[in-house]
């Protein structure tokens, strides 16, 4: 089948797909960072009750470094706080991009295949309902 969409329609659709892709990327990155934050929480929970002078190993730039709990714990807590800040920023960016995508979708009346199918089912059901009403009215 030959695509008969005008270049303007194609540009609108491409912009929508780009916005959708960006939203997916934000969601993926947020998920990854949430896992990393949970790992930091686990490390903090594990190290907190330990004696401060106990050996602790930390991966720094791909190198395993021997430190003490009192040296490692503050940096892990700081990293966790930084992850929270990045997560908040990403959540704000996702919200803004989602709003932009929704506005774009409404402005150009873009429907996903599922939405179009649901709309068609509703129309067919309305027709059936009218036909049934017509039969009952006779």
Image (cartoon, rainbow, N blue to C red):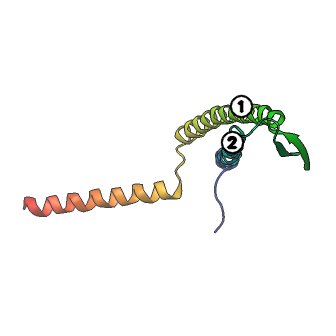
Front residue (pair 28, 79): 79
- Badge 1: residue crowd in 10 Å (few <14, some 14–19, many ≥20): some
Left or right, 135 with reference to 2? left
Alpha carbon of mark 1 to alpha carbon of mark 2: how far? 9 Å
Q: Foreground: 37 or 33?
A: 37
Point 25% across, 62% down: residue: 128
Residues 79 and 136: in front is: 79
Q: Are the residues flagged by discs 1 and 2 in contact, CB closer than 8 Å?
A: no
> Does residue 4 lie above or below 47 as drawn?
below
Q: Is residue 30 visible?
A: no
Residue 75: % across, % down: 80, 33
Q: Would residue 131 be seen by someone viewing this image from the given angle? A: yes
Residue at the disc numbered 2: 37
Mark 2 burial class by Cα count in 10 Å: few <14, some 14-19, many 20+: some
Ranked by sequence position, the earlier of labels 1 and 2 is: 2
Residue ID at (91%, 45%): 65
Q: Is residue 105 left or right of residue 121?
A: right
Q: Does residue 15 sit above or below 1 in this rendering?
A: above
Could you tell me which quadrant the N terminus lies in? bottom right
Q: Secondary structure at mark 1?
A: helix
Q: Which residue is mark 1?
A: 81
Q: Which secondary structure, mark 2?
A: helix
Expressed as whole percent of the image width and height from the top left, the position of residue 64 reads 90, 49
């Amino acid at each position: 089948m030959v695509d008969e969409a005008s270049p303007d329609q194609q540009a609108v659709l491409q912009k929508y797909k780009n916005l959708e892709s960006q939203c997916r990327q934000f969601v993926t990155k947020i998920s990854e960072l949430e896992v990393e934050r949970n790992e930091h929480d686990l490390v903090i929970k594990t190290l907190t009750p330990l004696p401060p002078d106990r050996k602790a190993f930390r991966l720094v730039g791909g190198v395993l470094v021997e430190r003490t709990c009192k040296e490692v714990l503050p940096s892990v807590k700081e990293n966790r706080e930084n992850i929270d800040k990045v997560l908040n920023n990403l959540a704000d960016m996702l919200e803004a991009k989602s709003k932009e995508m929704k506005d774009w979708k409404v402005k150009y009346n873009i429907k996903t295949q599922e939405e179009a199918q649901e709309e068609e089912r509703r129309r067919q059901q309305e027709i059936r309902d009218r036909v049934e009403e017509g039969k009952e009215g006779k």
